[in-house]
């Protein structure tokens, strides 16, 4: 079987763990995407790895970073082909990288949000399977064009939303679907203001905190209520002051108030999704929790606090979540994070891409198990309506 080559578009923190010329100070120092791909390559599940950015001068440092944190630690081959060349700057190098792929290969899009659409569309039109970081796109118009492209080219396009692979979230979804109609949902997710520096090129310029963080819980809620309820209107509100004082033209927090309607009874439900990126440095990198009230029960989740705490003289007190990405090697010194949900969400897509490329399945076969372009339109509609509500100062009917 010919294994799919994998091209990653984007060289940011989530891909490499390398930010502003150094290892990230967040909980993703070795990165997530790169480490996952190197392990999948080592296990014989994917073909060559390609990485495309805009500044080739970063690649020697990224290679050194990977060598120190991945090759030396786990014994994994961390080599990759890079675009553009190490001595070049080229914002269109991703097109040259696409030329190196064959029909059925895979493209992972982890760039600023405003680039998702054109990159995913170009890849799909070349017969490539595409995984896009959330939000998959920013408007339903773009979303609909990608649905059309996926179908006309018979390729798989999906959104990378790792909470669907979190065992606690997936278990909570099952419970919520068995305790009656939806009534109320409230979610909160934040990151420290220091994280803003990693997003300087796009924060408030091409996207906002709602697209970046609210997307997580909105997608989870949409997935939970699939076939049971539909959103009918969105009203957004925002706070500001801190980010602008730091030189970022953006809101501090965004809250979306969404009215839902249960399909069987017509009963109304309410959801409040809040995200912020001006939190103080705390015991976790991301505060993230939700409360859901249904007619016959309720669910509470604090994703950031899972009963595992530690303290050190250097780092102080912290609450850890190795379920997301286990960086601690096993007793043999090998990478042991295959069951981590940050890893699993990418591995599941690439399993599908390999199966499709080999002719063993079709994109349609993966509709029920992945966050496909066809299954995520409601998430895009809510996020887009939230932005419109802020810009227009009014409630948006869906």
Image (tube, helix red, strand yellow):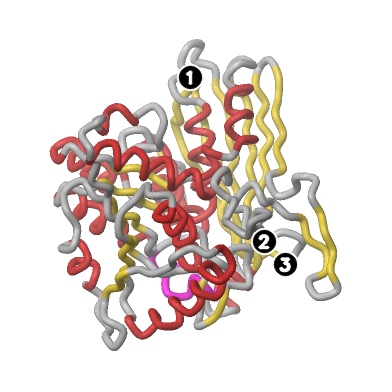
Residue in the picture at 49% in, 60% down: 35
**Which comes sooner in the sequence, label 1 or label 2?**
1
Residue in the picture at 65% in, 54% down: 330
x then y, percent, for residue 73 = 59, 67
The answer to whether mark 1 and mark 3 are in CB contact below 8 A is: no
Would residue 175 be found to the left or right of residue 353 on screen?
Answer: right
Residue ID for mark 3 = 280
Q: Residues within 10 Å of mark 3 (few under 14, many from 20)?
A: few
> Depth-wise, is mark 1 or mark 2 nearer the camera?
2
Residue in the picture at 25% in, 31% down: 360
In the image, residue 292 above or below residue 250: above
Q: Locate the C terminus by quadrant.
A: top left
Residue 290, located in which quarter of the rendered image?
top right
In the image, residue 144 above or below residue 53: above
User: Magenta segment, which residues?
Assistant: 197-206
Residue 382, located in which quarter of the rendered image?
top left
Q: Locate the N terminus by quadrant.
A: top left
C-alpha distance separating marks 1 and 3 = 38 Å
The answer to whether mark 1 and mark 2 are in CB contact below 8 A is: no
Looking at the image, which is closer to me, 285 or 57? 57
Q: Is residue 249 visible?
A: no
């Amino acid at each position: 079987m010919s294994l799919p080559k994998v091209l990653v578009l984007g060289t940011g923190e989530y891909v490499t763990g390398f930010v502003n010329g150094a290892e990230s100070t967040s909980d993703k120092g070795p990165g997530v995407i790169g480490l996952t791909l190197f392990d999948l390559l080592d296990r014989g599940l994917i073909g060559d790895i390609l990485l495309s950015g805009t500044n080739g001068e970063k690649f020697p440092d990224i290679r050194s970073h990977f060598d120190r944190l991945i090759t030396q630690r786990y014994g994994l081959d961390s080599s990759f082909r890079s675009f553009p060349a190490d001595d070049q700057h080229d914002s269109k190098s991703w097109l040259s990288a696409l030329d190196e792929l064959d029909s059925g290969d895979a493209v992972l899009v982890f760039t600023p949000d405003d680039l998702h659409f054109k990159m995913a569309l170009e890849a799909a039109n070349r017969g490539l399977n595409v995984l896009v970081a959330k939000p998959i796109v920013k408007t339903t118009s773009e979303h609909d064009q990608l649905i059309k492209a996926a179908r006309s080219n018979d390729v798989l396009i999906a959104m990378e939303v790792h909470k669907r692979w979190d065992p606690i979230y997936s278990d909570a979804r099952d419970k919520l679907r068995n305790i009656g109609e939806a009534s109320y949902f409230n979610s909160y997710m934040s990151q420290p203001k220091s994280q803003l520096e990693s997003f300087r090129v796009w924060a408030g310029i091409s996207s906002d905190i709602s697209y970046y963080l609210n997307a997580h819980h909105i997608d989870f809620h949409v997935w939970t209520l699939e076939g049971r309820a539909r959103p009918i209107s969105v009203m957004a509100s925002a706070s500001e002051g801190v980010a602008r004082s730091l030189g970022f033209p953006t809101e501090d927090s965004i809250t979306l108030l969404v009215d839902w309607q249960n399909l069987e009874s017509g009963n109304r439900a309410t959801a409040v999704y809040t995200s912020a990126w001006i939190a103080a440095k705390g015991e976790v990198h991301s505060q993230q929790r939700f409360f859901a009230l249904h007619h016959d029960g309720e669910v509470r989740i604090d994703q950031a606090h899972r009963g595992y705490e530690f303290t050190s003289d250097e780092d102080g007190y912290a609450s850890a979540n190795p379920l997301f990405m286990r960086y601690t090697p096993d007793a043999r010194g090998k990478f042991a994070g295959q069951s981590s949900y940050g890893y699993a969400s990418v591995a599941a897509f690439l399993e599908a891409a390999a199966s499709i490329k080999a002719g063993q399945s079709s994109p349609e076969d993966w509709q029920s198990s992945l966050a496909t372009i066809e299954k995520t339109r409601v998430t895009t509609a809510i996020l887009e309506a939230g932005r419109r509500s802020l810009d227009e100062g009014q409630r948006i009917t869906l």
